[in-house]
Amino acid sequence: MGYSIWEIAKAFIDDHFELAVDLYTQAIVVDPNNSEFYSDRAQANIKSNNLTEAVENLMGRPLVFFRSFGSGVLLSADSKFSYG
């Protein structure tokens, strides 16, 4: 296993969002049914301004979608789009 939960959390806290995305991707390979990894990777993608990837993390995964919506990930992503 090439990651640890603490290492991922530290990357996110230290604003190393691209590293966090990479580490969450490794975690998903090990545990592809862990909806928290997808949701957290979506948050890291939003912080990295990778909005397409963030949405892809949520699409087709109803539990991830609802968890993320509840934590404000979708609202955060929505605020990054400019309308008009």
Image: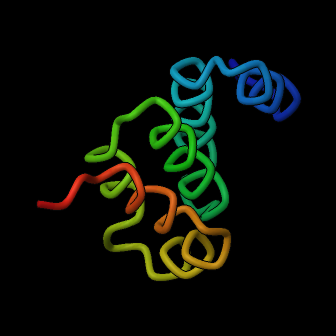
Q: Quadrant of residue 35?
A: bottom right
The answer to which of 26 and 42 lies nearer the viewer is 42
Q: Quadrant of residue 3?
A: top right
- Across and down, in percent, residue 42 comes to 49, 49
The residue sitting at 81% across, 32% down in the picture is 9
The residue sitting at 34% across, 36% down in the picture is 50
The answer to which of 22 and 52 lies nearer the viewer is 52
On screen, residue 33 above or below 61: above
Give the position of the C terminus as an image quadrant: bottom left
On screen, residue 6 above or below 2: below
- In the image, taking residue 7 as reference, residue 52 lies left or right, namely left
The residue sitting at 42% across, 57% down in the picture is 79
Give the position of the N terminus as an image quadrant: top right
- Across and down, in percent, residue 46 comes to 46, 43
On screen, residue 43 above or below 5: below
- Across and down, in percent, residue 15 comes to 68, 21
